[in-house]
Each structure stands twice: as structure tokens, then as C-alpha cells.
Image (cartoon, helix red, strand yellow):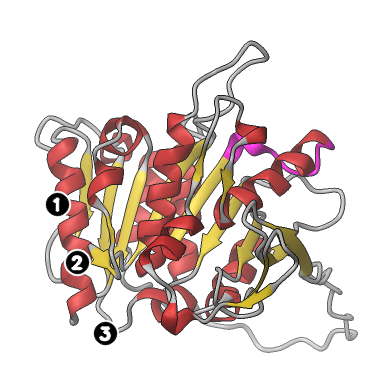
Amino acid sequence: MNRLRQLAVWALCCTFCVPAVAAPPVAAPPVAAPVLPAEPASQKLELETSDGLALWAWYYPVAAGGDPRATVILVHDLEGSHKTVEPLAKALQKVGFAVVTPDLRGHGASTSRSSPTGKTEVLDSNSLKRTELEAISAAAGGSVRDQAAMRGDIETVRNWIKRKSETKELNLQRLCLIGSGSGAILAANWTAADWNWLPIASGPQGRQVKALVLISPTWASKGLSFVPALATEGLKQSIPVMVLAGNTNRDDRDAMRVYDRLKSLRPQAWFEQRVGQEPAKAPKLEKAAEATVFFMQLDTALSADKLAADRSANTAGRIQTFLSLVLDPSD
């Protein structure tokens, strides 16, 4: 399937089936239904950030012997957990993507942090301050990434993927981020940090994110903002981005604001599908499939993690098409 045809699938609203005239039934011996292999069970990972947080994450691997189409870090919304986006993780796993979904600090199982003195602190999502939220996407300190002074939640997951990449189980060079709600800000900020790591003598150590998906992204939340990420070269021009949103609530307005800013930064590289409108693209863009920023608006009141997990919205299918489009442009 070429890229243009893949893109057309996104705009498909319904399928019409015309029944054929059936011949009289002919008795046939019963045939056993094929036994399909079950998807591998998720694996619970216990990791540790540079500031002592016991970070729990869930890994959804592809079937044994298979090569993942890409490795995805899935970042849930604030007040959520890996559970609230697990349906999306499993749907992507089913079509060949390896997915890692952490419980962000103060959420789910990731609530315990040990200080250098051995004291244990309990974090709660409702009382996290701005500095704690910023630590989720932190990746900085020094010139060597593996020795960075601050390795937050997403960076710690990235380092685990790097170790798996060294054993050929995963591929760090085909890394994608998906962020939901306020988690989209965190995913974007960490992606910007990834692009800020400069090469060293042994080779490149950043710019590993190849695609970014933002589901109902909020513009600003609890002191976090999209503005710093949108000022970096990676988000301004280089990284393919898809924005997914519904059309009937405040979060959708934020999503359109994020998309409109990206669109203004890439005036000749956008494609959009808004509810009730024909698909549109940049005036000088010859093929819609050559866009680098996409906006898909769905006719639903759902947003963020609920939209991510909703099967009827086919969120996983849209993300699969987008990732296939940008990761395998020659297909």
C-alpha cells in the first residue's frame, strides 16, 4: 500500500458492503477454526530515576521472534496511569509495535522515592508541584547522556529501551512518543530534550525520536506549557507530528491551538481532516502523504486517555497508519 492510499484510509468514514446472490448451500465437513497466537503478556518493569523514584512501567512486547515495527513510549494524562491507556498499548502491540507505558511519578504504582539519606517519600498525583512535573520529562546535566545528572521518568524508560536495543530486542533508532492530555506536553518536552543532546566522540546520543503523536494535547497545565518545546528545531521543523482530538470540549480547542502553531511553523507541510469538512492540505504540497504535521479531528466528545482507549474511534488504527507513513516513506 503506497503512502497516499494509506492516508486515504484515515478519511474513510464508512464501508458499504453489497451482498452477493448466494448459491444453495452445499454440505461440507466441519473445519476446525485456526488457533491464532495470543499476544505476549505485558511485563512489569521496576526502574529507578536519578532522583530515587521507584518507577514502574509496563512493557508490551511483540510476538517471540518478531521484529517490532517501532518502539513506542506511551505517556498517560495527569491523574491517569498505564491502565487508562492500556487498551491503546495492547492495540498497537497487536499490530507489531513494542510499547512501554510508565506510571508517571505520583501516579499508579510509582509513588515511592528514596532520598540519599535512605528516607522514603510518598508522592501523590494531586499534590505534585511544578518541579516534580518538570522532572518527568527531564534529561540534562553534563555532556554524556548516559551519565546525565537528571534522568527523569521518560528518560529512564528510554535508557531501558537503549539496553534492550543493545541486545537487538528493540530498536532505539525507531523510537516514537505518544502523549495524551497533559502527558502530551511531557512527551513534547522530552522529545525536545532528546533533540538537544549533541554528538560525542563515540557517535550521536540524541535525536532518536522519529515521530510524535499528541492525543488531545493541553496547551498549559499545572505550570507546564507547550511553548518551550515548540521553540526547538525538532518540533519546529523536523519531527513528524500527528495531533488527534475530538470536537466538543475545551481540550479540543487546546489541541487545535497546538496544531495551528505547528501548522504556522510548517506552512507548506500540513494535512488536516476536520469534522464536517473535506480534507485539506498546504497549497503547495503536491501529495498529502508528504506532509510532516497532521491534524485528525474525530466526531466524539471523548478526549485524552478516554479517546486513546476508545476502540470505536479507531485511535490505534489512525496512529498505526501515521507511523507507517513516516517510518517507512518508501512503502
Mark closest to the chain's N terminus, 2 or 1 = 2
Q: Which of 330 and 89 is in front in this view?
A: 89
Q: Is residue 95 visible?
A: no
Q: Nearer the viewer, residue 66 or 124?
A: 124
**Secondary structure type for disc 2:** helix
Q: In which quarter of the image is residue 203?
A: top right
Q: In this view, does 38 lie to the left or right of 317?
A: right
Mark closest to the chain's N terminus, 3 or 2 = 2
Question: Residue most toward the top?
Answer: 201
Circle 1 or circle 3, nearest the eye: 1
Q: Where is residue 229 in the image (x, y as percent from the top left)?
A: 31, 44
The residue shown at (67%, 60%) is 52
Report if the CB atoms under discs 3 and 2 are less than 8 Å apart. Answer: no
Q: Which of 239 and 93 is in front in this view?
A: 239
Whether residue 270 is in magenta: the answer is no
- Residue under label 2, please give it: 254
Q: Which amino acid does label 1 sit on?
A: Asp
The segment highlighted magenta reads 167-174
**Secondary structure type for disc 1:** helix
Q: Position of residue 119 (x, y in %)?
A: 71, 71
The residue shown at (71%, 40%) is 162
**Secondary structure type for disc 3:** loop
Question: Would you say the magenta stretch is mainly helix, strand or loop?
Answer: loop
- Residue under label 3, please give it: 301
Report crowding for label 1: few under 14, some 14 to 19, many 20 or more residues within 10 A (C-alpha).
Answer: some
The residue shown at (49%, 31%) is 207
Q: Distance between the residues labelled 1 and 3?
A: 20 Å
Q: Position of residue 167 (x, y in %)?
A: 84, 37
Q: Which amino acid does label 3 sit on?
A: Ala
